[in-house]
Image (cartoon, rainbow, N blue to C red):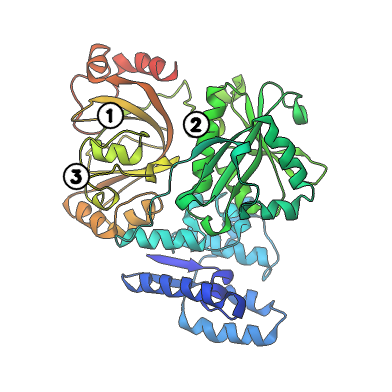
Amino acid sequence: MRFLIDTNILIKLEPEDPANAEADAALAMEINRLIGRGDHSLLVHPSIHHDIERDPNGDRAERTRFLLQKYYELADPPGADDLGDVLGSPEVGSNDWVDNQLIAAVVDELVDFLITEDYGLLRKLGRVARRDKGLNIQEALDVLRSLYDEPLEPPPAVNAVFMHSLDRTDPIWESFRVDYPGFDEWFNRARQEERHAWTITPDEQLAGVAIVKREENSPFGLEGRQLKITTFKVAEEFVGRRYGELLLKSLFRHANQNEYDGIYVTVLEKYEGLTGLLEDFGFVALDERTDLDELVLYKQLSPDEQALAEMGPLPFHVGFGPPAIHPGSADWFIVPIEPGYEEMLFPTPGQPPAVQPTLPGLTEWASKDARPRGFGNAIKKAYLSQTSSRLVSSGSVLLFYRSSDVQAIRAVGVVEDVLVSRDPDAIASFVSARTVYSLAEIASMAAEREVVSILFRHDRDLPTPISLDELISNGALLAAPQSITSVRAEGLEWIAERILA
């Protein structure tokens, strides 16, 4: 795999500042160790020299030039002229121009991932390529670890609590005190209102928190029932572990169950990582700003007639869900999935595992006396199959059918992208940010036949599973599915009504 590193990552990998040297050196050693385990490369882009030339510290610039000799330079990369309509045409040598050159290398598939701590760059990348082709340094470590059976401990579940139970002395609040001088007074008032909150607490440490309130006064001209996210934060040391996504999943479920028409949040413009996360899940910036010059990001949950008429299945789902399936979606597929793997992708709290996972790569995520934890709690997931079907495409609806014991559909997803390949590196690059499979296990699957890799978004869990008998009696299937199977035309209307009811 080929990883293109931004200038800010080069600085972390070659620490100079004594205050950060210990932590950055640990990152550097870990990344270099994992890169060295396989046929992987850390590359720099020739345009990085423009960044160095703009450095006002001449001694530091000279040192950086010397350190660049340790890294392979991307040979003859494409320019970004073809991306000008989307990214603009900044002055040659400027910071924006360098960013566009890095993005062009990703779009042209000369590299598998771009590693950067510049969240503005990651957002720009998402306008012309898959957003998860850009990684921060923690995400890059997670990807590399997943390739070598060294996954991080899976993220914990989200806890639903009331705001008044939160510890006001926790370090997670310090950035709020800096940004909002009246934060403590607000906190004391708000905690008396029994506001709903969600927390992520690995090892009893507050790693992530979200707090909401119901708005009654049509804020920013938004009509209907609006849910305001008053607080949303992932502690700095946990950034990159998809905890923000886990919190959003709980917020979406709360908003759907309580029939809100929309969700909004105000964000200081400097928090580009949070803004990018919210935009990836359908939030859009309104024209208005707050008195503190915050962005107002809004997600509409009730589609209008124009959206129904003009939006495709995937943009519709991203814009209004989860859950949201376009009523005009025609491509529905039933995906048989073994119980162990189903429990990994779609865990049910309190449910003991029915069987041990038998698919490659899952054993390290489960033990004989405890169910798998956490990994399946995210929204964006990956599914690998050796099916012969080639019909699944972006926007397709996936109905995950738990085989063997339950024999019923219990979860629904919407497809983002599909790759069919026998190239283990290409498959790993495609799914590694979302899967528990190691590179060796992917290679084993690909050695047998082509692997169909599906990136999808978890739309919903069904409160009442749809049994095999129902599927057959209503014409959706003729028999138990043995591979990915199209829903029969005779049963399509029935199953759509059942899912969307």
Are discs 2 and 1 less than 8 Å apart at CB? Answer: no
Label 1, on which residue?
401
Q: Of 382 and 392, which appears nearest the observer?
A: 382
User: Viewer-proximal residue, 452 or 223?
Assistant: 223
Answer left or right for 33 relative to 249.
left
Q: In which quarter of the image is the C terminus?
A: top left
| Secondary-structure class at tag 2 | loop
Q: How crowded is mark 3: few (under 14 residues within 10 Å), some or many (20 or more)?
A: few
Point 67% across, 69% down: residue: 92
Query: Compared with residue 495, is residue 133 higher up or lower down, i.e. above or below?
Result: below
Residue in the foreground of this view, choosing between 251 and 10: 251
Q: Are marks 2 and 3 in contact (CB under 8 Å)?
A: no
Residue 44 placement, left or right of 93: left
In space, the residues marked 2 and 3 are separated at their CA atoms by 30 Å
Q: Which amino acid, by three-letter code, is at mark 1?
A: Tyr
Quadrant housing the N terminus: bottom left
Residue occupying image coordinates x 62% and y 24%: 261
Q: Which of marks 2 and 1 is nearer the N terminus?
A: 2
In this figure, which residue is indicated by the disc labeled 2?
322
The tag on residue 336 is: none
For badge 3, the amino acid type reads: Thr
Mark 2: which amino acid? Pro
